Amino acid sequence: MRHHPKLIDQFGRTVDYIRLSITDRCDFRCVYCMSEDMTFLPRDEVLSLEECARLVRVFVSLGVSKVRITGGEPLVRKNALWLFEEVGQLQGLNELVLTTNGSQLEKQAVALKNSGVKRINISVDSLKPERFKKITRTGDLNKVLNGIQASIDAGFEGIKLNTVLMRGSNDDEAADLVQFAIDKKIDISFIEEMPLGEVDHTRNSTFVSNTDTLKLLQSKYLLTPSLETTGGPARYWRVANSATKIGFISPHSHNFCESCNRVRITCKGELYLCLGQEDKIELMPLLREFPHDDAPLIAAILGSMAIKPKGHDFDLKRAQPAVIRFMSHTGG
Ligand code: SAM
Ligand code: SF4
């Protein structure tokens, strides 16, 4: 493989982690993520799986060593497994990871493990079936729980639950979800709700701060801070006498942008340099105009490093969402 310069931005940060959304579609309609009736993109405006594989290959040739496949719900994309198998074989890629709502894992966990997926994040916001249905609007908790168990049985190196707490909805379940993670010997992260896309409630009516969640959990568990970092906005705590780590992903605090090591690619091939900013470049035209020549793509990606912003700017009090695009579009 040819060696290209590494991706280093104007502030000296090395980008070695990409998150790729392979679809904007989903079988759920989580209230914080989507509005009730979403319009999805026409098929030809979405990267083909071959284009996804080509993009990942090019990024890996530029020094990227970690790839997260996300969505929308990545596992509802037809033939998604083909992509995992292609990407799983790339030399230089150390970590292929996945974020999913878990609905398809009962069927796909073993094949995903065999394709080279190392770790899985599974989103689950409630352990109460009716409440789960209300939050996801369409989801079946039982299927997700079976998916979690299938993933544990498949033997991934790491499994982490992702939970978004919302005031008045599921904010009384933080401890129950942690206990579930402890019992299953897996990890859990609490993600603060971000103002991405217009949904059917105002964000600051439901916002639960991780500071409060941490305080509550500290009253029930002995937690010790962990030095571990993935270069992202998460802070981790270990639960005494257990295998479980608790992460707090707090995008509203500005304490992580200096170590940001990631960029995001939407299912339309837009390369977003920061989750909370609009700075982007369009990769789709380059993929389609030069199907056999990676040079223009590589030049554009290298050039994008000059516009990666220093940090983001989320403000819950703003009337408009800080960023118009939905998380399901950009990928979580
Ligand atoms: N469908 C998959 C899932 O739910 O895990 C992958 C995509 S989803 C967009 C990725 C993560 O983003 C999920 O953990 C979800 O809870 C989170 N998420 C979606 N919208 C969010 C928002 N507005 N604020 C915070 N987290 C959000
Ligand atoms: Fe779908 Fe994930 Fe968004 Fe829920 S959070 S609607 S599962 S993309």
Image: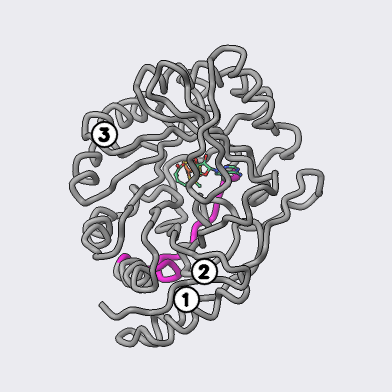
- Give the alpha-carbon distance from disc 1 to disc 3, as whole Å: 34 Å
- Please tell me the numbered disc located at residue 271: 2
Q: Is residue 166 above or below residue 23?
A: above
- Please tell me the numbered disc located at residue 23: none
Residue under pointer 3: 106
Q: Is residue 10 above or below residue 38?
A: below
Asked whether disc 1 touches disc 2, contact meaning CB atoms under 8 Å apart, the reply is: yes
Is residue 264 shown to the viewer in this render? yes
Residue under pointer 1: 283
Disc 1, SS: loop
The magenta region covers: 34-49
- Percent coordinates x, y for residue 278 in the rendering: 65, 65
Nearer to me, 43 or 52: 52
- Viewer-side label of 3, 2: 2
Q: Mark 1: which amino acid?
A: Leu
The answer to which quarter of the image holds residue 306 is: bottom right
Disc 2, SS: strand
- Percent coordinates x, y for residue 80 in the rendering: 29, 55
Nearer to me, 294 or 231: 231
- Disc 3: CA contacts within 10 A as few (<14), some (14-19) or many (>=20): some
- Disc 1: CA contacts within 10 A as few (<14), some (14-19) or many (>=20): many
Residue sitting farthest toward the top: 220
Q: Mark 3: which amino acid?
A: Glu
- At x 54%, y 55%, the residue is 39
Residue sitting farthest toward the front: 227
- Disc 2: CA contacts within 10 A as few (<14), some (14-19) or many (>=20): many
Is residue 57 shown in magenta? no
- At x 73%, y 55%, the residue is 313
Q: Mark 2: which amino acid?
A: Leu
Q: Earlier in the sequence, mark 1 or mark 2?
A: 2
Q: Earlier in the sequence, mark 1 or mark 3?
A: 3
Q: Earlier in the sequence, mark 3 or mark 2?
A: 3
